[in-house]
Image (spheres, helix red, strand yellow):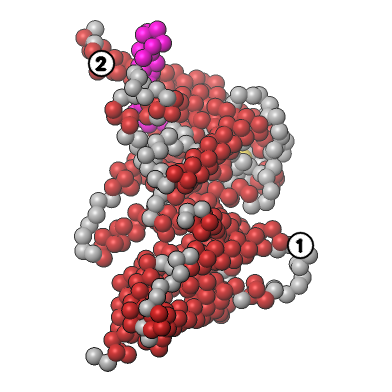
Amino acid sequence: MPVFSGAGGALFAAKLAWISGIGFASYRVFRTGRVSGWRSLFFIILAWAFILEFKATLLGLSGSVWVTPEIREVPYCHIAIVSTFLNHLYYQYLALMSGHWLKWSPLAAGLLFWLLATLSIGQGWCSWACFYGGLDTTFSSLRKEPFLKWFHLPRGARDFSLALLIAVMLLSLAKTQPVYCLWLCPLKISTGFLDPDTVIRKWQFAIFAAAGILFVIALPVLIKKRTFCAFLCPFGAWQAIVGRISPFRVSINPEVCTLCQQCLKACPIYAIDATGVKEHKISSYCNRCGDCFDACPTGAIDYSIGKRLSGTPLPRILFLISAWLIGGSVSLLFVPSAILKIIRWVSSGFHG
Amino acid sequence: MNPLVSISFEGLMLGLSTGSVCATTCFPFLLPYLMTEGKSGLRKQAFLLLKFFSGRLIAYLLAGGFAGWLGGRFRGRFPESFHDWALIVLAGAMVFFASERLFFKKTACLRSPKPFVSRQFPFLLGFLMGWNVCPPFLIGIDRLLEIGNPALGTIFFFAFFISSSLYLLPLFLLVPLFSSDRLRTVGAMTALLVGSGYLAKGVFALFFSR
C-alpha cells in the first residue's frame, strides 16, 4: 500500500503497530483487572526504546544505523528541569529587573504537557510515562523473590529523595549549573556538558558509574525495589508534592484489608510502610503502578478519586484511560522509531 | 561628597544591586538550617533571626575592617586559599550540625539541655556565612583594598550588610511552615547533603586543583 511505502510510511506503520500494541495491553488490563504485568512490560519497552533512540552512543554505536544526527541532541529531561527550577525562576527575576523578558526556554516547552500529565495522572507519571523508570523496573523484575528482604526502611529514610530535591535545587541555584545532572544523575549519557577539568570529570564519571550500577542495577536486582526512583530521583519527590493536584489516589479499603502486608512487600518504591498498613494509608510517593493491587489477596486496594474508595470501577477506568493516553503519547515520540531501527538492524543481518 | 556618606552609599548600592546573588549563595545553607531549627513562636523566631544577623554583621564588620587595614598597609590581597578555608569551615559546621540532629539527637543527651554550640549555632552560621566569599563580597573587598582605610571599610560593609540582608529576610517568613518533625528531618538531611557537597568542593579546591 502506498501509504506505508518509503521511510515516512514505514514509520507510520510502526506507529500504527505500536498503538495497536498499547490498545491490546490496555484491553488485557481492563479484561483481567490486573494492572502491573502489562504496565511493567510497556514501561520497560518505553525506557529501553528511549535508550536506543536517544542515547545509543552509550552502546558505542557511533556512526552506525543507531545514531542519526537528531539523536545527538539529547533532550533536556524532566529530572533536569525540576532540579534547576529555582534557576529558571531566578532568570525570570533577573529578566524582570532588567526590563527585558527572557524566553521561558525548556521550562515553557514542557510546562503545558507536564501540567496536563500531572493533573490527569499525578505521581502516575513515574510509573506510566517516565522514560527512565523502566530501567530499574527491568532489573527489579528479573527475579520473582528478592535476594535481600529489605521491606522496611529506617524512619525518615523514604524522605531522602525530598531532601535531595531541595539540596540540588539550592546548589544548582548557587552554582548556576545543573548540579544533579553534573554530579549525581546515573542516567546521563551525553557527556559534552561535563566539567572540562580532567580530574573533576573523572570524579563525575566515577559517581555516575557508581550510582548507576548501585541504584539502577544492583539494588533493584537484590531487593526487588526501584531504588533509583525511590531515593535518587528528584522528580519523584517533586511529583509527590505537586502530584496532589490530580484527583486520583490509591486507597485501601479498611473493611476488606487483613493487614497481611503483602502490599508493603510488593510496593516497588517504599510508598507503603508498616504504620501505613495499620492505618490504611498510602504515602504521597505512591506511583499508581498497581503492583499492590495484584499482590493484595483480598482485593482491598484500588484507584480512587479522593481518599476513599467509591466501590465503583469508575475511578479505575478513568485513571487507566488517562495513564495509557499519557504514557502512550510519550512512547509514540520514540518507541516506533526504535522498533524500526531494530527491524532494520535485524534485516541487515545484524550489521551497521 | 563627604567620604563617610559616599562610602555608605557605595555599600548600600552594592548590597541592593547584588543582593539577589548574595541570597542565592546563602540560601543553600540558610534554608536547610531554618527547616531543621524552625521555631513556631514569633518570639523564638525573632531570637533566631537576631542571632543569625548578629553573627553575619560581626563577620562583615571584621571583613571590612581587615580589608581596609590590609589595603592601607600592604596594598595586598586576601590569600588565595582564604575562600576555600572559609567554605570548609562553614560546610564542616553544617555537616556537624546536621549529623548531630540526624544521628545523635535521641541518644545519651536526651534530657540534657541543648549544648552551647547548638544554642549559638544561628550566630555561628551567620558569622561563618558572613566570611564566605560570594561575588558581591569580593567586589566589596576589592574596593576596600583600593581605599585602604579600616574605618571606611567597616562602614562600607555595615551598609552592605543592611541592604543585602533585605534579600535574606523573606526566607524567615517561611519558618512557620517548617513545624512538623518530618520536615525537620528532611531539613537535616538537606543540610547534610549541602554541607557534604560544599565540604567536598572546598577540600578539592584546596588540595587537588592547585
Label of residue B107 in the image: 1
Question: In terms of secondary structure, what is the magenta stretch mainly?
Answer: helix
Assess disc 2: are there few (<14), some (14-19) or many (≥20) residues with their C-alpha within 10 Å of its C-alpha: few
Badge 1 crowding class, 10 Å Cα cut-off, few under 14, some 14 to 19, many 20 or more, is few
**Magenta span of residues:** A327-352
Tell me the chain of label 1. Answer: B
Is residue A252 shown left or right of residue A164?
right
Which image quadrant for residue A96? bottom left
Camera sees residue A324: no
Q: Tell me the quarter of the image containing the N terminus of chain B.
A: bottom left
Q: Residue at x 31, y 45 (%)?
A: A106
**What is the spatial separation of the Cα atoms under label 1 and label 2, in whole angstroms?**
68 Å
Please name the residue shown 45% across and 81% down the image: B66
Q: Amino acid at mark 2?
A: Ala
Q: Nearer the viewer, residue A277 or B26?
A: B26
Element type where label 1 sits in the image: loop
Q: Is residue A314 magenta?
A: no
The residue furthest bottom is B2
Residue with the mark numbered 2: A7
**Residue A289 coordinates in the image, percent (x, y):** 53, 33
